[in-house]
Amino acid sequence: MGSVGLLILFAIVGAVICAKSRSAGGAVVFAGLALVMFVATPVGQGVPGAISTFLDVFDGAATPVLSREQPAAPQQAGAGER
């Protein structure tokens, strides 16, 4: 499993070379390969969960704005409470 880091590095270098030579398809393939190999490592196993959490928070923040819902009025403390 020690050579996975080297394979990820080669995939990133391949993506950069393809991008510089204006081969978008090759760059996407190499970048996707590097991402898949990174997620397969113990360090990258938390990436899918982090992306899922980020998208859930983003969806929760964007849904009221996109559906034009009015935010609930803040509740005020009673006369005796402070």
Image (cartoon, helix red, strand yellow):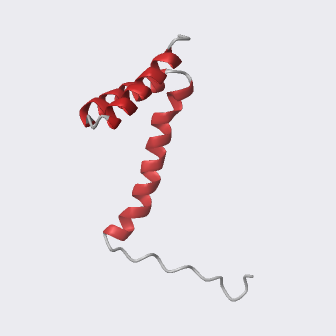
The C terminus, quarter of image: bottom right
Outermost residue, front side = 21
Decide which of 58, 7 is in the foreground and name it.
7
Q: Is residue 25 above or below residue 11?
A: below
Give residue 12's quadrant in the image. top left
Q: Image point 31% across, 69% down: which residue?
A: 67
Furthest residue toward bottom: 79
Q: Is residue 66 above or below residue 41?
A: below
Q: Quadrant of residue 42?
A: top right
Residue 9 in percent (x, y) is at 48, 23
- Image coords of residue 25 (percent x, y): 24, 33
Across and down, in percent, residue 74 comes to 55, 79
Q: Residue at x 73, y 86 (%)?
A: 80
- Horizontal arrangement in the rendering, residue 35 relative to residue 81 (left or right): left
Q: Nearer the viewer, residue 76 or 46?
A: 46
- Image quadrant assignment for residue 21: top left
